[in-house]
Image (cartoon, rainbow, N blue to C red):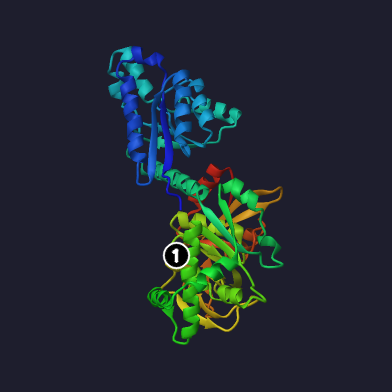
Amino acid sequence: MNPSPLRLGLFGIGLDAYWNQFPGLKERLEGYVSQVAARLARPGVEIVNAGLVDNPDRAHAAGREFRRADVDVIFLHVTTYALSSTVLPVVQRAKVPVIVLNLAPSAAIDYAAFNALGDRTRMTGEWLAYCAACPVPEIANVFQRAGVRFHQVTGVLEDDPACWREIDAWVEAARVAAAMQGNRLGLMGHYYSGMLDIQSDVTLQCATFGTHVEHLEVDELSALRREITPADAEARVREFREKFDVQGDCGADDLLEAARTSVALDRLVAQHRLGSLAYYYRGTGVAENEATIASIILGCSLLTARGVPVAGEYEVKNVQAMKIMDLFGAGGSFTEYYAMDFKDDVVLMGHDGPGHIAIAEGRTKVRPLKVYHGKVGRGVSVEMAVKHGPVTLLSVIEQTGGRLALLCAEGESVPGPILEIGNTNSRYRFASGAREFVHRWNSHGPAHHCAVGVGQLTDQIRKLGALLGLETIRVT
């Protein structure tokens, strides 16, 4: 849904007065910048390398180059001492977050070899090649006073896996931020009446994440559903049986109804180029619309597994969280607190409606339901647990004063009995214990839904929040 590559701006810094004084220093520093460019390169990423910026004129030119290229984030490789007046114009014109790379060329200077050079000029040139840490306080001071958002990575250019893991995490966070900006979110229907916590300022969502919102009519989905041929519906039923563990008591008519809606959903998503969808609708008084919404769950689950997360109950904030988790490759299944098991010290979490079947423990079951609790609905629904192992919860929350924040936590999906009621359902254990974790999570005032994904992602989420200018709260 976001075909444009992630564009990373990169530049190194130096001082042009050095070049005549210290032969070979400029070329050596340019080599460092080239090494960083090579390490940043990866599929789906375009590197805009402005090279070594060594005077204010070159700084203004580099800023214009980054602005024309529409870079998403800038990596500033501090290669040696440079004047802050050489740095500020680059980032002021580009107006994107800056990652300051304070990278030494090696873990330590060879002091004996350095002192044996015997030539003070050569020694000074060699010292300047290791002088990355020197201007960082000056740059930080000026960025702080100029209101430039910046973040730091400190380490070694080579043979420093921890340093490069952190840099890679910044690249991944920038990729997710750019993809969110290119995402088209469909909103179909209306809020679940009475759930005041889930209602959200859609303009704020667009302004914060760059999301484009398409308001959709359920009638359009119903109209598309009329066009589905019996052959297309039968083909989708066969796909259901491949992707799901369809239980024997599921009625053939219910599966066909779900198949028609699923194919129609795919066409709706394609026509509007959607990358995510939130919906809720009763369809009361219009039998066709009621049938459409009642049979939507399997199709929404397939879409969610294909990278188009779907949230029920018109949960705008949570579909944003689900999309973030999916872009990080973690899944992002719609969930809420169900109950607490104080004997096993776990929290039971799940939800009715769509589930992210790509992160399920085993095959996702399809079960028939005569009623949906609190909602119009019948037919078939999905039952799954999230893969056992590390998980991350994410909630996009609206704080007092009308600002968004990211609320996250890491835990573990653990085996054990679940409620076999045709819903998603998992058992989660947290380091602080179920009782204390629930207290801490709720103290930040989230909505009752959140997204769950596999793996430990709070560090990446923190970096995403930093790039977006959002507070990130980690509950432990």
Q: Please give left or right for residue 251 compared with residue 115 in the image.
A: right
The residue at the point 50 percent across, 78 percent down is 257
**Corner quadrant of residue 315:** bottom right
**Corner quadrant of residue 466:** top right
Whether residue 93 appears in this view of the structure is yes
Look at mark 1 in the image and give the residue it sits on: 305
Image coordinates for residue 458, horizontal then vertical, percent: 51, 53
Tag 1: Cα neighbours inside 10 Å, few (<14), some, or many (≥20)?
A: many
When the figure is inspected, residue 446 is found, relative to residue 162, above or below; the finding is below
Q: Amino acid at mark 1?
A: Ala
Image coordinates for residue 401, horizontal then vertical, percent: 71, 47
Asked whether 154 or 392 is in front, the reply is 392
Query: In the current view of this chain or complex, which residue is farthest to the bottom?
Result: 249
Q: Please give left or right for residue 233 compared with residue 42 in the image.
A: right
Whether residue 250 appears in this view of the structure is no
Helix, strand or loop at mark 1? helix
